[in-house]
Structure formats: structure tokens, C-alpha cells
Amino acid sequence: MFANSRPVASPQSGPHARLAELVRRHLQHPFRRPVGAPSQRAFDTLAAALAGDPRPRVLDAGCGTGASTLQLARRHADAVVIGVDKSALRLATGQRALDAAGAPANARLLRCDLVDFWRLAAAAGWRFTTQYLLYPNPWPKPEHVQRRWPAHPVLPALLACGGALELRTNWKVYAEEWRVALSLAGRSWHIDCLDAQAGDALSPFEAKYRASAHVLWRVRAPDDPESGGS
Ligand SMILES: C[S@@+](CC[C@H](N)C(=O)[O-])C[C@H]1O[C@@H](n2cnc3c(N)ncnc32)[C@H](O)[C@@H]1O
């Protein structure tokens, strides 16, 4: 694959100066924005479909077309792998591909805003065994720091949904911001670089960044049963 994706450009060379203050505030104060009606409906439909299903749950947050959801469903064959994205267009493209490929029965795609999904899942007591966040939008402008998941008010709900976390990004600063947020939340973490030669890319963005020779960062936090729950 030929790709010429530009590396992330930002005046930030390290974690945002306000990050720690924002994370502490969000960890202490509940996020009160009402949940959108379409998100509630989408979540209720999924919850009804999964009611009584004893399988572990894995989340592919911001799954795009769901190509990674398909791979993760094969990797976690004993679990239900839920790919969530807010883009109807990407999900429709992905669903067609899943149908054509004979998608594994344990893969599900859901159109929902993650800001609502994490709060609904946490309130319903859901716990994922693993949450994957593959190449989320990094919002590199410093003034957009609160749009980044580690500095977003939804962070406590995301963490309450539990499980191991795996974040991948092509922006080192974003990986470092996750490290800061996880530390402040009392979670342990591990950062490394992905070996671009090892195995297939897990997602389309990963494939694009690999083909553009970007350094790819991975932050992993093992499950911490003490920090989750709702
Ligand atoms: C950079 S793309 C990465 C897609 C995929 N994970 C990959 O690695 O190929 C980020 C994705 O996150 C989705 N996204 C961003 N904000 C979201 C939100 N609040 N709720 C749900 N999806 C969101 C976008 O629609 C987009 O598909």
C-alpha cells in the first residue's frame, strides 16, 4: 500500500500544561451532560440483544469501518466484540464488508457517540475485558485538549467500564497524555512502540500510518478490578 500520511503537527511537544488539572477535575466531578436520544436507543437495542449473553465483552472504541472489529472478533473468539463509531457512513461501508466476508457471529457494529456509550455502559454495570482505542482523533491543537479522551469528562465512565486498555496512536504526545491520565487514575500502564514488521495491521489507520513509516505508539493498561465498576 502506498501512503503519504503526514505526521501529527502540533505546537505541543509534551503533555498539555492543563492536563493534570483537567483529569483530576473530571475524576472528582460527575459528567452531567444529558445522553442523546439516538444514543440511548442504540444502546438499548444492543443491551436487549446481549441480555443474558454470558460471553465476555470487548470494545473497539471508534472502530471506523469495523475492519479492526472483525480482526478482534477472530482474536477474541470466546467474546462478543462490539465496534462503536458515530459515523454512519463508515459503519455502513464496514457492515457491507463484514456481510461480504461472512463476519464472525461474535462481531457487532453499533452507531453511537462514545461520549454517551461509555456513560450508558458504565451506568448499566457493563465491564469489558479489554477496550481497544485504535488511533482516536488526537485533536493536536492545544485549545482542543478537552476533546482528547484522556482530558475529556467522559474519562471516569470509560475507566469504570473496566478491563484492560489498549491505545494506539501515531502521536507520541497523545500516548504520554494517556500515561499521565492513567497514573492520576491510579492505573498502571506500559508504553512501547509497535513493531511495524510484525504481523498484519490491526486497523485501516494503522495500515496507512505503517505505509507512511510513522512511529506508532501503544499504551497498555492491564485490567484493574479495583478501579472499575459502577
Ligand atoms: C482516526 S479514525 C480511526 C478509525 C479506526 N479505529 C482505525 O484505526 O482505522 C477515528 C474514528 O473515531 C470515530 N469517532 C470520533 N469521535 C467519536 C465519538 N465521539 N463517538 C464515536 N466515534 C467517534 C470517528 O468517526 C472515526 O471513525
Image (cartoon, grey):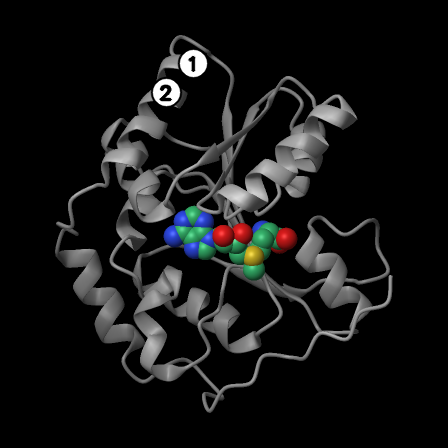
The spot of residue 201 in percent (x, y) is 76, 52
Q: Is residue 178 visible?
A: yes
The spot of residue 91 in percent (x, y) is 56, 39
Q: Secondary structure at mark 2?
A: helix
| Residue appearing at x 37%, y 37% in the figure | 225
The crowd level at tag 1 (other Cα within 10 Å; few <14, some 14-19, many 20+) is few
Tags 1 and 2 touching, CB below 8 Å: yes
| Residue appearing at x 24%, y 58% in the figure | 153
Left or right, 131 with reference to 147: right
Identified by mark 1, the residue type is Ala
Left or right, 48 with reference to 66: left
**Mark 1 sits on what residue?**
49
**Mark 2 sits on what residue?**
45
In the rendered image, the vertical position of residue 98 relative to residue 89, given as above or below: above
Q: Marks 1 and 2, how far apart in space? A: 6 Å
Q: Is residue 69 visible?
A: no
From the viewer's side, name the closer residue of 75 and 36.
36
| Residue appearing at x 26%, y 66% in the figure | 23
Q: Secondary structure at mark 1?
A: helix
The label on residue 216 is none
- Give residue 48's quadrant in the image: top left
Identified by mark 2, the residue type is Thr
